[in-house]
């Protein structure tokens, strides 16, 4: 058996994945022709990762599926020329890394660690955080990453509520779906974690109105997609005290421009 695999990625991604993919296919008895400029009419599979612009997939009439190197889908699912099945990457290492990142920052804010780490005024100020069982944590997005994070936080004793587009069941997590469910999660989330995919339905989901539904002084942690948040609404909420902190690992524009107020 032989297949032709077209990479629509950056040159760096092609160089990184070409040889391992060829070896993996060979181990299963599949001879592969892998390239970046194969004749479109000969291509059986497409390997895709965002590299600027929106690719026109129309010429690849023979292709059976497109395989994504990213966990995110926002750069491809809105492409009207994508008419074949699309499979995104699910990587156990990525999931574990996200669980560690989210858990670390939830604990950081839960314990008020910044009050000690950033203190330079020589004032002794004792603060006693509540137990995890008295802290409400909300997770928006219960897919591979969000579900794993919600389950991990529940395992530490946090009162975790989660929201997703479709109803899901996760041990130890109170899950919700739909517009009404979103409001219920926001109203209880002293710490809110955003792990939704970026789609037309989720872009700027966290606008001023929804940020206002959080408990006053809440924390937002966004390791998902920058455009999930209205930047101006977030800054206004921080200035007003509606939010006490925001931990952002992703931004609407990347790299973040030097003049952006998020640097302040």
Image: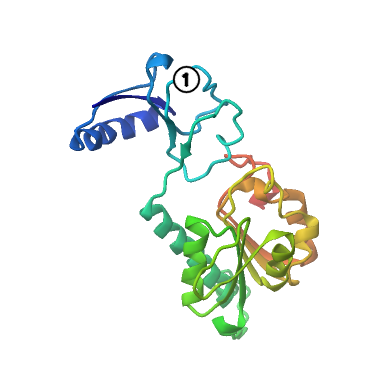
Residue 231 falls left or right of residue 24? right
Task: Give the residue at x 51% y 69%.
Answer: 170
Task: Give the residue at x 48% y 37%.
Answer: 86
Image coords of residue 209 (percent x, y): 80, 58
Q: Is residue 119 at least partly visible in the picture?
A: no
Name the one closer to the observer, 192 or 169: 169
Based on the displayed image, in which of its 4 quarters is residue 130 positioned?
bottom right
Q: Is residue 84 at least partly visible in the picture?
A: yes
Q: Is residue 162 above or below residue 11?
A: below
Name the one closer to the observer, 249 or 74: 74
Image coords of residue 182 (percent x, y): 70, 63
Q: In this view, does 190 lie above or below 228?
A: below
Residue 128 falls left or right of residue 211? left
Figure coloring: rainbow
Q: Determine crowd level at label 1: few under 14, some 14-19, many 20+ residues with C-alpha closer than 10 A.
A: some
Count of marks, rendered view: 1
Name the one closer to the observer, 34 or 181: 181
Task: Give the residue at x 46% y 58%.
Answer: 98
Name the one closer to the observer, 52 or 142: 142
- Helix, strand, or loop for circle 1? loop
Image coords of residue 165 (percent x, y): 63, 55
Image coords of residue 232 (percent x, y): 76, 50
Instruction: Locate the N terminus and report the quarter of the image it occupies.
Output: top left
Read off the residue under disc 1: 61
């Amino acid at each position: 058996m032989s297949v032709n695999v077209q990479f629509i990625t950056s040159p760096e991604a092609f160089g990184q994945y070409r040889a391992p993919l060829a070896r993996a296919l060979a181990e299963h008895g599949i001879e592969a022709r892998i390239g970046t400029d194969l004749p479109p009419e000969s291509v059986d599979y497409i390997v895709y990762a965002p590299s600027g612009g929106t690719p026109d997939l129309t010429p690849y009439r023979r292709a059976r599926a497109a395989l994504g190197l990213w966990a995110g889908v926002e750069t491809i699912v809105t492409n009207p020329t994508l008419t074949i099945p699309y499979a995104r990457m699910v990587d156990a290492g990525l999931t574990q890394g996200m669980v560690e990142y989210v858990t670390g920052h939830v604990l950081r804010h839960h314990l008020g660690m910044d009050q000690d780490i950033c203190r330079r005024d020589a004032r002794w100020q004792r603060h006693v955080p509540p137990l995890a069982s008295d802290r409400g944590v909300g997770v928006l997005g219960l897919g591979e990453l969000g579900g794993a994070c919600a389950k991990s936080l529940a395992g530490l004793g946090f009162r975790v509520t989660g929201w997703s587009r479709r109803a899901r069941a996760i041990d130890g997590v109170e899950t919700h779906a739909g517009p009404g469910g979103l409001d219920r999660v926001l109203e209880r989330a002293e710490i809110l974690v955003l792990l939704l995919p970026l789609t037309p339905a989720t872009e700027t989901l966290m606008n001023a109105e929804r940020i206002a539904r959080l408990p006053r002084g809440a924390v937002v942690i966004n390791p998902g997609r920058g455009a999930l948040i209205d930047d101006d609404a977030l800054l206004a909420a921080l200035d007003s005290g509606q939010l006490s902190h925001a931990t952002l690992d992703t931004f609407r524009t990347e790299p973040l421009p030097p003049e952006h107020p998020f640097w302040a």
